[in-house]
Image (tube, rainbow, N blue to C red):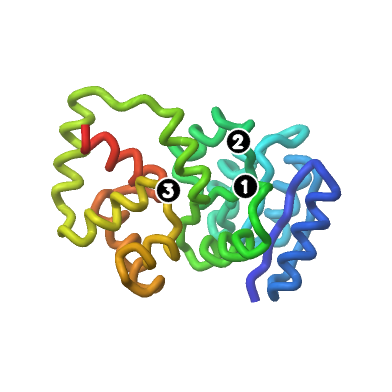
Amino acid sequence: MTTVLVADDEPLVVEGVRTVLEAAGFTVAATAHDGRTALAAAERHRPDVALLDLHMPGLGGLAVAERLAATAPATRALVLTSFGDQENVLAAVERGAAGFVLKSCAPEELVAAVRAVAAGEAYLSPAVTRMVLGLVAPESAPRRRDAAERVARLAAREREVLDLVAEGLANAEIAARVHMSEATVKTYVSRILAKLECANRVQAALLARDASG
């Protein structure tokens, strides 16, 4: 059974998330309201997923995630964020965080995010993808050339899926657009990330945008 650490400095958020996850069959192994407590709890319980608020007293979610990567690499960090955390979201994208989910998301999306990260996949909220694409300026000419060369590795159908990822669409939305099953789209996305050497969907979306000039 998948175990989860929930860390947020707002008790109401923690209890709400706990209720959603336990109803979906996950085990909430521990909760925390500050970064240092979250780090200690993660090292003690070794949960499959650490759901971390970006802003917590003592240590922020990114600092906790970085330390866990060194001390408890089996625990994958899923960042809990909002649009107010733009700078930290960008930093986390660059570090290849396992996933991002918005506090405003539906319970079903939270469950899907935890399930994906626990399975070793990356989960990026489509809204986060769109936000990051709007914040990051296009790269320099050499980086655009590199992006174009990497995207050229993809087959035509893979490029079609990548373009939809770059629009910030979720797998279910892509599946409806290209008339595939959601499972097939998931396979395509995994293959695309591997070919592009990207850690997550946001990195792939940025690469696609740079490749298009």
Which of the two labelled residues, at mark 1 and mark 2, occupies the earlier sequence position?
2
Alpha carbon separation for disc pair 1 and 3 = 14 Å
Dots 1 and 2: beta carbons under 8 Å? yes
- Residue 202: quarter of image: top left
Nearer the observer, 175 or 193: 175
Q: Amino acid at mark 1?
A: Leu
Q: Is residue 204 left or right of residue 3?
A: left
Q: Amino acid at mark 3?
A: Gly
Nearer the observer, 48 or 11: 11
List the residue tagged with mark 3.
168
Residue visible at 41% across and 35% down in the picture:
133
Q: Is residue 34 left or right of residue 156?
A: right
Q: Position of residue 103 (x, y in %)?
A: 68, 47
Q: Is residue 12 left or right of residue 151?
A: right
Image disc number at residue 83 = 2
Q: How many marks?
A: 3
Q: Position of residue 138 (x, y in %)?
A: 31, 27
Dots 2 and 3: beta carbons under 8 Å? no
Which of the two labelled residues, at mark 2 and mark 3, occupies the earlier sequence position?
2
Alpha carbon separation for disc pair 1 and 2 = 8 Å
Residue visible at 18% across and 26% down in the picture:
142
